[in-house]
Image (tube, rainbow, N blue to C red):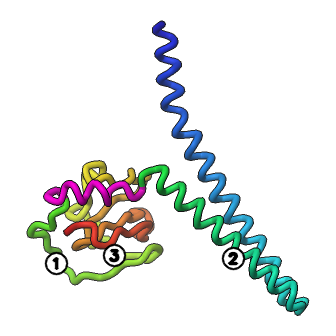
Amino acid sequence: MRKLIIIGLMAATMLPVTAQAQSQREVRRDRQELRQERHELNRAYRRGDPRDIREERRDVREARQELREDRYDRNRRWGRNDWRGYRNSNRALYARGSWRAPFRYTSFRTGVRIAPAYWGPRYVIADPWRYRLPPARAWQRWVRHYDDVLLVDTRRGTVVDVYRGFFF
């Protein structure tokens, strides 16, 4: 009986890992298909046949849509936006408070490199699970920037993800 319970627990822990790997493979495959469709569209432009160009444009649109849908499904499956509903029922936890920074507010985008002063230890969110934020990977930290939350890659200083208006 003990072995059966242990096997059941092992299977329960492995299921999310395999599902995540599968969804990552789907997104990667869709990205690859999108690149291929763009390549074929460029080839159609070089040939100059309007019918081919129209068909290839349609294929690129469909590939983009598939990629968007797979990304959305992956994010929904792993609770990326789980914090929104939780925030509405726990407003006191997300209250802004008297938080101020010695620098002005800047609206950061993903991929932008920011100075270490913005993601110093004073601004790191030590318990992202408390706010229902997805876990940060190695070398990444969740950082508060006024009402926004940034996921910063601390090796390069680049913004990986941004949640605007996270705190009230």
Farthest top residue? 1
State the CA–CA distance, disc 2 to disc 3: 37 Å
- Helix, strand or loop at label 2? It is helix
Is 125 located above or below residue 102 in the figure?
above
- Residue 46 occupies quadrant: bottom right
Farthest left residue? 98
Q: Is residue 82 magenta?
A: yes
- The kind of residue tagged 3 is Ala
Task: Say which residue label 1 marks.
Answer: 102
Task: Say which residue label 2 marks.
Answer: 61
Position of residue 92 measured from the top left corner of the image (x, y, whole percent): 13, 58
- Helix, strand or loop at label 1? It is loop
- The kind of residue tagged 2 is Arg
Does the CB distance between marks 2 and 1 fall below 8 Å? Answer: no
Task: Say which residue label 3 marks.
Answer: 115
Q: Mark 2 or mark 1, which has the lower sequence index?
A: 2
- Label 2 vs label 1, nearer the camera: 2
- The kind of residue tagged 1 is Pro
Q: Mark 2 or mark 3, which has the lower sequence index?
A: 2
State the CA–CA distance, disc 2 to disc 1: 45 Å
